[in-house]
Image: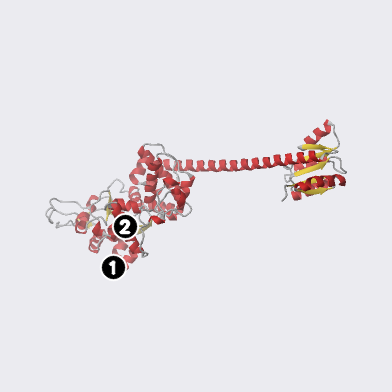
Amino acid sequence: MSHGKILVIDDTPANITLLTNTLEPLGYEIFAAPEGEQGLKVARRVQPDVILLDVMMPGRDGFAICRILKEDAATREIPVLFITAKQETSAIVQGFRAGAVDYILKPFQNEEVISRVETHLRLNRLVRELKQKNDELETQIARTNAAEKARAAADERLSSMTARETQRWGLGGFVGESRTLRKILREIDRLHQFGNTSVLITGESGTGKELVARAIHHGSPRATAPFIPVNCVAIPAELAESMLFGHQRGAFTGATADRKGYFELADGGTLFLDEIGDMPLPLQAKLLRVLEDGRVTPIGAAEPRSVNVRVLAATNAELAQKIAKGEFRQDLYFRLARYTVETPPLRERPEDITLLASHFLQFFANDMGIPTPSLTNEAASVLEAYHFPGNVRELKNVIERALIESGGDPIRPAHLRLLQMPASTSRTSGAPRTSALPSGLPLNLDEAEQALIQRALQQTNGNVAEAARLLGVNRSRIYRRIPAQVGGESD
């Protein structure tokens, strides 16, 4: 194994032989050139670690050759040691001015040659290592500066929305820069101009369908009128008609007073019907009639009442499949879907995850009255690699818990509690692993979902809201799966 490459430029063959016999047995690879021009070519080609350069040579002398070596970027960093019989101070100074780092007087001693060569090899090696470390440090500084600029830009974008509007209308759910999010924002802006058009909002649970509905209402001419959100799954079937359309006193047992329904409460504003796909068929027919003629008839009333309501509906179900099965009216679908907005799952907009996480950190820190901690690069990488089955809602819950667990310190992977971590990070994050799933979990997806819901309800003593948060799903999903087991629960 070579300990280094040494180039000897000398017009005296005996000197080349002597230096080769001295250095080669020590493991050095020796290259030789009998004059300066050839030496320049060899130096550029082999890139030696040290050059031993004779001063007195035919043609260009050693001083001239050294200056050319130092002017060439390819050979500038190679240390040059002069070999000279001149002992005058002026000759030595001239050598240093030309760019040499040392000199060896003729006739030279083997021990002196070895000592000076090894010294300058070590020095040159240390210089290269120092340069490499400096380059790495400069790269790290540049990355840090870029990260700080990006964070400052994110903070500036976040501050452009007032805290009041963010909290009231959930505009934090729209933090991000992805193409899909920008498309949704353009659609919302377009719908602001059409204050009567009904809209169907589709997407998975936790993707922010209600936030889209609120944003549509808030920017429309109806903004000063009520926004009434209704979860169609949570309405008991026997009370659904009364809650939507109202009733008069004495219309049925327990009707001790007149009551306005959601349509009348939303008069002049917006009625948001969440999980519309789970509305019973008989109620769908009545809803269609209200949408068509703009009038509601409370239970027990003789005459209908006119209402001016914009209906926004949302679903995480495939309505086309429900229509094919006869579970949803096609005419109601066409009436609701005058315009459709699709909210994408968070896994389809990974570029927004870190910005959203930083926003939620700021939101919860302000709410808790503590300084906003930073999100470490490692934690950001874990979040960006995770698939978020619960979407933005899950991310928000994860960040709130991480802030509590960190105690206000920078958020690290160990503070993130995710249902399923990527393989590359699961060992260090402290997150639950696949082995934490119930043993004997059915391979049938439908049965597996029911088993997981059963287990979540057992762990939460039947608290549906808490079970839904644990699973990262909407409560309606639990209501649909096992309605007989969910009674009153606290949120």
Task: Kindly state the secondary structure of the residue where label 1 is placed.
Answer: loop
Q: Which amino acid does label 2 sit on?
A: Ile
Q: Contact (CB < 8 A) between labels 2 and 1?
A: no
Q: In percent of the image, x 85 and y 41: which residue is there?
A: 61
**Residue 102, quarter of picture:** top right
**Residue 480, quarter of picture:** bottom left
User: Viewer-proximal residue, 359 or 86?
Assistant: 86
Q: Position of residue 187 (x, y in %)?
A: 39, 54
* Mark carried by residue 469: none
Q: Note whether residue 86 is visible.
A: yes
Q: What residue did someone put label 1 on?
A: 326
Q: Where is residue 337 in the image (x, y as percent from the top left)?
A: 33, 60
Is the residue marked by circle 2 packed among few (<14), some (14-19), or many (20+) residues within 10 Å? many
Task: Kindly state the secondary structure of the residue where label 2 is placed.
Answer: helix
User: Viewer-proximal residue, 354 or 183?
Assistant: 354
* Discs 2/1, front: 2
Q: Note whether residue 337 is visible.
A: no
User: Viewer-proximal residue, 445 or 324?
Assistant: 445
**376 relative position to 328: left or right:** right
Q: Position of residue 472 (x, y in %)?
A: 35, 53
Q: What residue did someone put label 2 on?
A: 453
Q: Which amino acid does label 1 sit on?
A: Gly
Cα–Cα gap, marks 2 and 1: 27 Å
